[in-house]
Amino acid sequence: MPRPTPTKTPDDLPDIAAPKWEAARPQTMVDLAVAAIISGATRGVILPGDRIVEAELAKALGMSRVPIREALRILESQGVVTSAPYKGIRLMEVSHERLEQVLDVRANLEILAARRAIEAGRNGPAELARLRAARDELALVAARKDVYAFALADAAFHRTLCELGGNPVLSVLWESLARQVTVIGGLATLGKPMAEIVAEHDRLIDAFASGDVDMVASELHDHIVVFAHSIDFDAIIAERRKLRT
Amino acid sequence: MPRPTPTKTPDDLPDIAAPKWEAARPQTMVDLAVAAIISGATRGVILPGDRIVEAELAKALGMSRVPIREALRILESQGVVTSAPYKGIRLMEVSHERLEQVLDVRANLEILAARRAIEAGRNGPAELARLRAARDELALVAARKDVYAFALADAAFHRTLCELGGNPVLSVLWESLARQVTVIGGLATLGKPMAEIVAEHDRLIDAFASGDVDMVASELHDHIVVFAHSIDFDAIIAERRKLRT
DNA sequence: GGATGGTCGATTGTATACCATCCTGCAAGC
DNA sequence: GCTTGCAGGATGGTATACAATCGACCATCC
């Protein structure tokens, strides 16, 4: 066993508000497979509960079974797919209950992140600028009525909020939940106009800027819980099934 | 692509207080590898920052590289090991900061679980009995001064609390954090007598029984944050390094 | 001397072939 | 109708091979 390497990070707490270099991580087949599966799930190529066959996927993606298996393990430990030995792997089942569970935890993680950010004074101009930029992106795609991009932009906004919390552990967990929401919601036909959602983000930013944790919590809760109730699963599944042919 | 299977679970919300059958999941090599790595990490066979070489592990555990890699992917996505393509995989680095981040999130997850349990009225006699059983186990191993078993029993107690929340998504995330705590804390020489920690759990149970969410939150926070500060990393690492020879 | 560039072993990422085990669906038999 | 048994298919796993890459070492050159 080799000696441990210190791996000291000299730049441990730089200004979170302005990320800069970010070492380019080479794309491996595994990353590609993960992305492909997520993409397929959100676009309806595979529907919730569908079985995912390693060999098929390997052929479809032009790679061997090994990276596929690794990708599926990753997704399994993130709750995107479920598996039992010898019985195969299936895309996660979705249900209103499940969605509410995911969103309940997610909302609370975001509230915690916001609280820590405010406590640490990370709700100043620099941080607000990042949030506003995300909000503007949201408004932009809303104007274009691009539902898919809207979902991405929404995720980006909330991701930013989590990062401001300054707790990478929290961010990692959030990412896993966000992935599940993506799969569940996919290209969900939202229950209310996008403009209204943009407005909700505005209120959220205001609350965050004011440093009122309770108000942030309230806004977040409304924002997210309402989202949960605005989804009609049967319609979504039916639509995707048609899309797939 | 095959048709989706409903996979309806007829026993969807039985009494959480009394789990019974629990389909025996066959042990695969991957499960074994995961357990082995965790075990090795907590017992000091591998130290934080140590490189983990696939081939070595494969030989040591008597299996091929494939299941090893899958196990490592799982652990990576749970934050127990870190990896970069072609640069190998290392056991997570530990630091006080990291521990605090993990515990901050973990405490908040537990608080959320307790809140939901109380809201749902799942803090009655049946549920309290489960918690008290876990507490008694804790006292038992404390009397035997078995530090390792104590850590396990402590985890079991908090796991039970999470389960009472009735949100499996939350439980899964908690499990990932608990795993990290296990690796970080390992056989941590605790900063205070075990008897006192048992007493803290008693207070926690009382607060939970009373249904006072704020008090539960307060108890949990103290319990966990104090734990974080009672750890002397340098001592732990030094001790493990000696253990390894 | 220190920076630059190249070589080489070690390790990872991936492919391929193959096998044992287990699940699933279907048909025969009661 | 219900159970039993069987065949095909998928999964978990092994063994082996090879290309890509990293890291360390070494030679070179300014």
Image (cartoon, coloured by chain):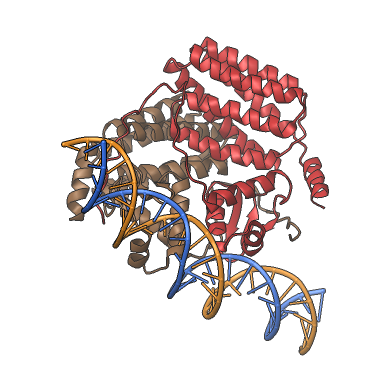
Chain colours: A red, B brown, C orange, D blue
Residue B119 or residue D13, whichever sits in front: D13
**Quadrant in the picture for residue C1:** top left
- Residue A240's place in the image compared with A160, above or below, is below
- Residue C29's place in the image compared with B243, above or below, is below
Residue B67 or residue A212, whichever sits in front: B67
Q: Is residue C30 left or right of residue C3?
A: right
What residue occupies the far top of the structure in this picture? A210
Q: Residue at x 52, y 49 (%)?
A: A77
Q: Residue at x 51, y 50 (%)?
A: A28
Image quadrant where one finds the N terminus of chain B: bottom right
Q: Residue at x 39, y 28 (%)?
A: B221
Q: Is residue A150 left or right of residue A213?
A: right
The reply to whether residue A108 is visible in this rendering is: yes
- Residue A50's place in the image compared with B138, above or below, is below
Q: Is residue B132 left or right of residue A90?
A: left
The reply to whether residue A214 is visible in this rendering is: no
Q: Residue at x 73, y 58 (%)?
A: B5
How many numbered marks does the figure carry?
0
Q: Can you give x and y, in whole percent of width and height, for residue B78 in the image?
A: 46, 45
Image quadrant where one finds the C terminus of chain B: bottom left
Q: Can you give x and y, in whole percent of width and height, for residue A76 in the image?
A: 56, 51
Q: Can you give x and y, in whole percent of width and height, for residue B214 in the image?
A: 47, 23
